[in-house]
Amino acid sequence: MPQNNFPNLNNDNNEIALVEGDSSYSYAEVNQSIDKFATGLLNGREDLQEERVAFFIPASLDYVTTMHGVWRAGGIAVPLNVASAVAELEHYLSCASVTSMIANGEYQESLAELCAEMNIELMSVADVMAEAPGPLPEVLPERRAMMLFTSGTTNKPKGVVSTHKTIRAQITTLIEAWSWTDQDAIPLFLPLHHIHGIINILSCGLWAGATVHLFAKFDIPKITAEVVAGTYNVFMAVPTIYVKLIQYFDTLDAGEVSKICDGFRPMRLNISGSAACPVKLFNQWKELTGQVLLERYGMTEIGMGLSNPYDGERRAGHVGQPLPGVEAQLFDEDHNPITEENTPGEIRIKGDNVFLEYWANEKATTESFHDGWFCTGDVAVIDDGYYRIMGRSSIDIIKSGGYKLSALEIEGTLLTHEDIAECAVIGVEDETWGESVMAFIGLKPGASMEYADLKGWCDGKMSSYKIPKAIKIVEALPRNAMGKVTKPDLKNLV
Ligand code: MCA
Ligand code: AMP
């Protein structure tokens, strides 16, 4: 029996696990579907032996079937962002040496050429499904289970590998800390190639025996209608979603707004994370809905690390304390632990929740640990017992609407434009996105550039949320004596 088996996906439980549009699926049905998929994927083999199976599927029964099917068959699940530009996928697929790709309908069509070129077998969920469940391998907890891509301070995203044990630890800490039960109902509209959607919402929901309502995207009218109907008692989102909800309220009349707010009011929990929740937003949400947002801090490599308490003071602008089973410590630049309050240091994390490795990148893996601690690159202080995030140690990481973006990756693509001689990308403060991408561009002699043209050029070359929201044409980028671009100086040119 695979060790990753979720308690409620193990039996003939007839409670509703997933709601997708007008359809709903019980735990028993989901379980059956997963077993048939895993059997079909094995296709007579005993164990996938950590083969990498990628999938390009929006939130749906098929997504859950594929993710768990790969796990039960002994493979490594590689969920991809369905909003990615196809041009970006080649890196993920070659980095992970993916052997099979699962995608349906129009998604399958968009991938056919790339998969053929890369010799990757492309199948739909229906293609894979066996008629009946067959024998499945025993998958030990230490085995690799999932690879998620994360942008870093290097050019191309790295594959973050977690084991079944890692995933279990990332889930169970949240089940305990946030008091999940089988009575919970939660909407899932976040993308399913990141921890926030995969672990905090989908996996915790399924572990607890709750009902997860799936949306292919953040569809405000549909989701708020369900909020009004009292469908959910838990809501989790990135700060941008709360901003967008408040912006949406501005388009409605007062009666409609108060109905939606009255739908949020009785929920047992509203959570914000993936990026800093501004104090102003925390207060606005409280005023509108009575909900005191629970802010927490996490990272692809660690799942969740710090959280405000479920019972107890949830402090605005702070991310709380270490979660159960997670060890956290601040360190100075000389690797000495910081013991005084209000002294900034890098957050380092230990625990079963921490990932195994960056795929096929021993150097990056080794460099990201020190004395057994995972070094997050985030700087924080402890302020009266609560961690407060101060920022990141690298200016090259941008957090836009909850997505972590690499300035270097965006610059790398912009530099392939025939009129661009040099460029530098930074994140600038933005009320909706937290940070938004801005590019400073030096043009080749005689060239000119309009923003709209550059945006059009970027289409298809990078995911749309990475495309700069603004550009500034400069004579020359500011550089230090060594010739390195001094990015902090660019902030003054915004
Ligand atoms: C969409 N757009 C964006 C972003 N999202 N621009 C910048 N940053 C973004 N994040 C742009 C599109 O390119 C498009 O531009 C326009 O907005 C409308 O796109 P649409 O897809 O309709 O927007 P939306 O549905 O309103 O999306 C906003 C969103 C989405 C729902 C907030 O960005 C989102 O799901 N963010 C969450 C990502 C996430 O789950 N992060 C967690 C990873 P144009 O019109 O010009 O084409 S972090 C994590 O997992 C760690 C462990 C943690 O701590 O949680
Ligand atoms: P990702 O690697 O995409 O999972 O993003 C992880 C990063 O998001 C962390 O390293 C932090 O920089 C940021 N982050 C997550 N949660 C918070 C939060 N509550 N406040 C500030 N930053 C956050």
Image (cartoon, helix red, strand yellow):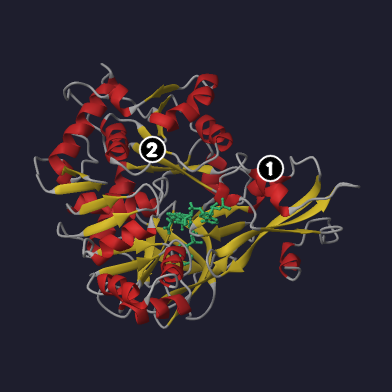
- Sequence-wise, which precedes: disc 1 or disc 2? 2
Amino acid type at mark 1: Trp
Name the residue tied to disc 2: 57
For this view, does 284 lie left or right of residue 89? left
Quadrant in which the N terminus is drawn = top left
Residue 9: where, in percent of width, then height?
17, 42
172 vs 374, nearest the viewer: 172
SS for dot 1: helix
| Relative height, residue 3 to residue 219 (above, below) | above
Residue 367: where, in percent of width, then height?
56, 49
| Relative height, residue 159 to residue 231 (above, below) | above
Residue 306: where, in percent of width, then height?
38, 66
Amino acid type at mark 2: Ile
Q: CA distance from mark 1 to mark 2?
A: 26 Å
Instruction: Mark 1 and mark 2 in contact? Answer it, CB < 8 Å.
Output: no
459 vs 178, nearest the viewer: 459
Residue at the location (27% across, 72% down)?
310
Furthest-right residue in view? 446
Mark number, residue 457: 1
| Numbered label tally | 2
Tell us which disc is closer to us: 1 or 2: 1
For this view, does 265 lie left or right of residue 249? left
Does mark 2 have its CB less than 8 Å from ligand 1? no
The image quarter containing residue 288 is bottom left
Quadrant in which the C terminus is drawn = bottom right
303 vs 9, nearest the viewer: 9
| Relative height, residue 432 to residue 154 (above, below) | below
Residue 474: where, in percent of width, then height?
82, 59
Does mark 1 have its CB less than 8 Å from ligand 1? no
Residue at the location (47% across, 81% down)?
341
Mark number, residue 416: none
